[in-house]
Image (spheres, rainbow, N blue to C red):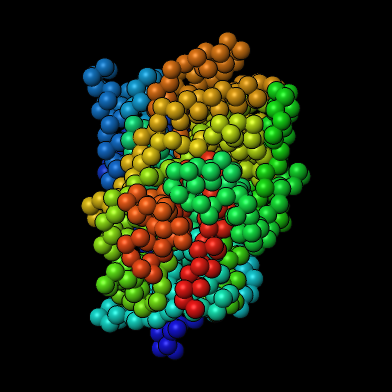
Amino acid sequence: MMSPETRVPSSKSPHLRDEGRDEGRSDDGRPLVLSAHEQEIVVAIAAAALPAYGTLPGGGRDTLAKLLRFMKGMPKDFLASYRPLLWMVELASVPTRGRPFTRLSRNDAEVFLDAWANGALHLQRSALRAVLTPLKYAHFHDPKLFEQVGCRFELEVVRDEPARHMAQVTDGRELGDRRDETLELEAEVVIVGTGAGGAAAAYELAKRGHAVLMIEEGDYHRRSSFRGRAPEATKMMYREAGVTIAWGNVGIPVFAGRAVGGSTVINSGTCYRVPERVFARWRDRYGLSDYSAEQMDPWYQQVEAMLHVEPARREHLGGVGRVIERGAQALGMQRHGPLRRNAPDCDGQGICCFGCPTGAKRSTDVSYVPEALKRGAQLITAARVEEVDIVAGRARGVRGTLANGRKFKVKAAATVIAGGALMTPLLLARSGLRHPMLGKNLSIHPATKVLALFDEVIDQSRGIPQGYTIEDLEDDGIMMEGGSTPFDVTSTGIPYVGARFMELMAKFPHLATFGMMVQDRGRGSVREGPGGRLIIQYSLDPRDLARLQRGVVRLVELYRAAGARRVFPFVAGAQEITTAADVEALARRKLKPGDIENTAFHPLGTARIGTDPRTSVLGPDQQAHEVESLYVMDGSAMPSSLGVNPQLTIMAMSLRASEQLSARLS
């Protein structure tokens, strides 16, 4: 498949190359230095938003220094968007107070920011959140502050286990720097992406004797890279360092992975099968007669066996699981308990979303990818595929560029694209596909959370971050799943400023977080913007907003039933709930899209399957209607929102499609 000259095996663990880079510089070497005035704005905002409280130090020049370090390695567009936000805050006080923000007294500055954080204007709340998120992240990402609240800051470095299959992995940076010479490779099947879909396909095809080459834009991070440090992990393994935003009637962060293993490396390990009601909709609306819970059962069983799926162990549910179970029982809820995960040997370190340091979570980097490599597949990392070669209506392979700048070309009998629902449509569009549904039909499972303060110690730093579930409202498209977060990450999710914010952070050991997501009816789109930028458009549907509101109200009731002292739904105009009358008022409110804090984790549907070539990009076998031998095996293929975490279904469908592809190749 690769000639001896072109294949350069490496047993080393590829990682981001930060050595020798000046602090405060972007990935392309450009300086990331704020002007003197902008630095003063940061200091003033930090001082007002993060005043000292108890033993927690306040914000100031130390926070500025931390922020500048945080900016190192961020996407090149980060500073370009952050600087105008600083000036927005600086100048916004002039019309009402006659002076810029940096000239306000400390008290006036705190009052000014609090008015933005809790005001009626969504634009102000969103702008302040965008300013404060990296600032809070940087400030609280400090071992001394972690120690103040009884949390560990960093894990011990775990030695990587020897792995013979790593000889099948080549870091694209090591394939020579002869930029004037294209690297030419050949495989029977080339697979672009190593997340849930691509890795499962690689395993199934390699198992069946096909010569498989996997191409991955990110790096292969081994266990020694996973130290529980959120900022470093987001830069290493999250697309656009975790600052990908869907824009519409509200801005929603959409998280996706960029590494060997894709989003499976940074998810919480939750494993659900799609409910039969969803498959029934696929059959009725899209003509997918071969999809049902019964027909998909063999594929689900294979995936669950590979991932060792089982219910989370109670000893690792932590304080959050304890109080959520207590509240659910008090409310008479029926369908709740430890959720099913792909981490049989989990020890409850609580950092699943930043890479599992023990390898307990069976993400594809420790399951399907190694098993594919053991069966003869090859993997090249740090290689960006830019185009699918399409000749006479047939896919012939791919072209791209290695991280060292060298061009490469792969010739293949079949091409599988598995870059995820955000990136796959962009690649297909660059390759000449012009289907009207390509990049459309985007669903993202809008999600939110509710925070509560208890007298008892909760300690979110210990226990599975998403280990408990409540499914009573699942048939209505509302899934409740645990959402514990580390100390520094928790700070970014609390939209408060001033003493009220710092009080909650000081009481972190007594805080509990639990989340929910909805099976969205709204749909968005993705496209490539100027300079290759990813543009996501998505507006929150009123029906989905109503579901979010209903779920938030139910979680508030649950926390109160569990004995919470104070409950924080983080809904504009209802930041804190203390009485039954407050709950009733929240339930009656007519909310606007920006009134609830939103995030999203499961982009799906941008190259959906179906039987009608006019309304679907792919056929039921996940082969493109318009291009022979071109397959899509990732979340793009989903014809609708699932309402549950999608990784099991993506893998099961990829195994099914790969079996059909193998039959054609044979």
Q: Can you say whether 416 is above or below 41 in the image?
A: below
- The one nearer the camera, 252 or 650, is 650
Which corner quadrant of the image does residue 159 belong to?
bottom right
Residue in the image at 40% along x and 36% along y: 522
- The image position of residue 321, as x and y in percent, is 69, 37
In the rendered image, the vertical position of residue 601 relative to residue 161, given as above or below? above
- The quadrant of the picture occupied by the N terminus is bottom left
Q: Position of residue 481 (x, y in %)?
A: 61, 38
Please state if 614 lies on the left or on the right of 256 as rendered. Answer: left
Q: Is the residue 441 above or below the residue 328 in the image?
A: below
Residue at 42% over, 66% down:
416
> Which residue is outermost to the bottom?
4
Up the image or down, 9 lies above or below 491; here it is: below
Residue at the top extreme, as displayed? 581
The residue located at (59%, 43%) in the rendering is 275
Residue 357 appears in the rendering: no
**Viewer-closest of 387 and 99:** 387
The percent position of residue 112, horizontal first and vertical second, equals 36, 21
Q: Is residue 567 visible?
A: yes
Q: Position of residue 218 (x, y in %)?
A: 44, 63
Identified at 70% across, 42% down, the residue is 338
Q: Is residue 604 left or right of residue 100?
A: right
Residue 28 lies in quadrant: bottom left
Total numbered labels placed on residues in the image: 0
Left of 351 or right of it: where is 408? Answer: left
